[in-house]
């Protein structure tokens, strides 16, 4: 069985067990951190450096030699040097012949060079077996053994034995190797550490755009309109009232947008009568960032919950309540109790709480540690069935909020309806289409398509049969 390093102290090797020697070219940050980790995991480490005599910072127990001498000590050489300095390796072609060269390098920009660093290294030393690995692990994570840092090491190379040897080392260091195939995958692997939240970009920009749009929309309706017609200064609404309209509206729209691509895909499959035609790129991208859209939506729902909790302590709210009470005392006129209003208000709050609870549950189940413990059917149940239930509850919460106000003449200001009406458009559309899609006659066809049935091939078959019958 393979050994796996879990302790931070040097392992005492069994005297009968021979230590495997690994050579590291470069005594910089990464070379030092990787060397220390390897030493702790029972490897013998020898460094190849330009100045072997000036290497006082290296972990004790390691040897430092010239590049050529060090390379002769091991058949695995980790090149912990920036690509710009690879040229000297051509002089070592002979000594590197047949050896495994591990390229750990990263670039400063995505697709900085026409070929990947690993392919460039393979061109410089054609007789060596170049393997790309370790570039997604930082020197800091190797040194501190950070549990919260990524442990995935993407490995690729043209020689399967060489790749396997490197993957064994990765496992021994307590990291997780992920075989990415041949060396052509290196450019993609080299781009990984340079990408900045690629799947979060669309949800982030979309939510920012929605927030800005609804914020200015609310300012026009609730600040500018009252000022123009009643000379009222409602600018303080911009601190709590308006954000507490913008956040739930954004959360609901984003949640609906998590489910919209699914229904669009189903409609496309029904229209095309096959599942074997690619979806448009925009739909593919949209589907890939549904989890992120949902998590951003959950963040806005949290903000809405917090903003709602502070309503009773607001000066404006306390002032209004006091004034209404005083007015009733002066006029000796009590506000009659309305059961329908009580129902609507309790329903609104209850639907909101339940919707928020399910929303949080969805967020928790999207965590890798939780979703890994679920099988495919369980995950689908939570994300699809519970997800739709969350969307229904949150939409119903908004409908109950609108309640009697949907019929009020004040609903339009400068022809602009309330934000909650706009917020309902996409969720209601998604729910109506979903409802149509789950009707037995349509759902049956959709299921057949998803199991591989194709309308055109069936038609052509029956057409052919028809012809042959004639
Ligand atoms: P570094 O601290 O600058 O060290 C690079 C080492 O390369 C130097 O210490 C030097 O070692 C050697 N070197 C410099 N110029 C050279 C030249 N002209 N010819 C031959 N050797 C030369 O860089 P690093 O952070 O350790 O990064 C090393 C490699 O690891 C890079 O390709 C980087 O992309 C990759 N990497 C780094 C990290 C990280 O967290 N730092 C993470 C993943 C991947 P000698 O003085 O001993 O010759």
Image: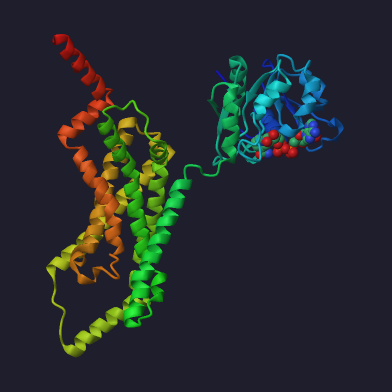
The residue furthest bottom is: 330
**Residue 175 visible, this orientation:** no
Disc tally is 0
> Which quadrant of the figure contains the C terminus?
top left
The residue closer to the viewer here, 134 or 468, is: 468
Q: Residue 168, percent across and down?
A: 59, 21
In the image, is residue 329 above or below residue 377?
Answer: below
The residue closer to the viewer here, 427 or 157, is: 427
In the image, is residue 220 above or below residue 166?
Answer: below
The residue closer to the viewer here, 76 or 89, is: 89
Q: Residue 80, percent across and down?
A: 71, 31
Q: Residue 133, percent across and down?
A: 62, 28
Please indicate whether residue 127 sits to the left or right of residue 145 in the image.
Answer: right
Please indicate whether residue 161 sits to the left or right of residue 353 in the image.
Answer: right
Please indicate whether residue 398 sits to the left or right of residue 158 in the image.
Answer: left
Give the quarter the ligand 1 occupies: top right
Q: How is the image coloured?
A: rainbow
In the image, is residue 451 above or below residue 238?
Answer: above
> Which quadrant of the figure contains the N terminus?
top right
What residue sits 26% from the left and 40% below the top?
Answer: 385
Q: Which image quadrant for residue 418?
A: bottom left
Q: Residue 188, percent across and down?
A: 57, 31
Q: Which image quadrant for residue 6?
A: top right
In the image, is residue 15 above or below residue 376?
Answer: above
**Residue 428 visible, this orientation:** yes
What residue sits 63% from the left and 40% below the top?
Answer: 109
Please indicate whether residue 37 sits to the left or right of residue 402 in the image.
Answer: right
What residue sits 31% from the left and 34% below the top?
Answer: 378
């Amino acid at each position: 069985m393979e050994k796996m390093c879990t302790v931070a102290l040097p392992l005492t090797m069994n005297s009968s067990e021979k230590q495997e020697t690994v050579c590291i070219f470069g005594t910089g940050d990464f070379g030092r951190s990787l060397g220390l980790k390897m030493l702790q995991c029972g490897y013998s480490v020898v460094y190849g450096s330009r100045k072997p005599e000036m290497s006082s910072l290296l972990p004790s127990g390691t040897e430092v030699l010239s590049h050529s001498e060090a390379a002769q000590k091991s058949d695995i050489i980790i090149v912990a040097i920036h690509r710009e300095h690879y040229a000297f390796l051509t002089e070592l072609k002979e000594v590197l012949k047949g050896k495994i060269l591990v390229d750990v390098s990263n670039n400063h920009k995505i697709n900085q060079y026409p070929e990947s660093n690993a392919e460039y290294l393979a061109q410089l030393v054609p007789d060596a077996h170049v393997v790309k690995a370790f570039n997604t692990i930082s020197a800091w994570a190797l040194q501190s053994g950070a549990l919260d840092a990524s442990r995935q090491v993407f490995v690729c190379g043209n020689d399967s034995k060489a790749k396997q040897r490197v993957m064994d080392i990765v496992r021994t260091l307590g990291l997780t190797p992920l075989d990415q195939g041949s060396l052509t995958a290196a450019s993609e692997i080299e781009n990984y550490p340079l990408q900045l939240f690629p799947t979060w970009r669309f949800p982030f920009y979309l939510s920012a755009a929605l927030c800005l749009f609804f914020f200015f929309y609310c300012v026009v309706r609730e600040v500018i309109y009252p000022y123009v017609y009643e000379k009222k200064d409602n600018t303080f609404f911009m601190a709590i009232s308006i954000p507490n309209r913008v956040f739930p509206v954004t959360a609901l729209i984003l949640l609906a947008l998590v489910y919209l691509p699914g229904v669009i895909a189903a409609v496309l499959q029904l229209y095309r009568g096959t599942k074997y035609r690619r979806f448009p790129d925009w739909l593919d991208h949209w589907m890939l960032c549904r989890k992120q859209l949902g998590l951003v939506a959950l963040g806005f729902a949290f903000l809405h919950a917090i903003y709602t909790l502070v309503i009773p302590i607001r000066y404006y709210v306390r002032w209004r309540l006091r004034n209404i009470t005083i007015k009733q005392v002066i006029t000796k006129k009590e506000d009659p109790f309305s059961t329908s209003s009580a129902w609507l208000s309790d329903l609104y709050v209850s639907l909101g709480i339940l919707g928020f609870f399910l929303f949080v549950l969805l967020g928790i189940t999207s965590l890798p540690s939780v979703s890994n413990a679920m099988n495919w059917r369980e995950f689908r149940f939570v994300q699809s069935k519970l997800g739709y239930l969350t969307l229904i509850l949150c939409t119903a919460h908004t409908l109950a909020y609108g309640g009697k106000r949907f019929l009020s003449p004040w609903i339009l200001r400068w022809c602009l309806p309330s934000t909650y009406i706009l917020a309902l458009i996409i969720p209601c559309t998604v729910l109506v289409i979903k409802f149509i899609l789950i009707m037995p006659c349509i759902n049956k066809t959709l299921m057949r398509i998803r199991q591989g049935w194709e309308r055109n091939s069936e038609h052509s078959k029956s057409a052919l049969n028809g012809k042959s019958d004639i």
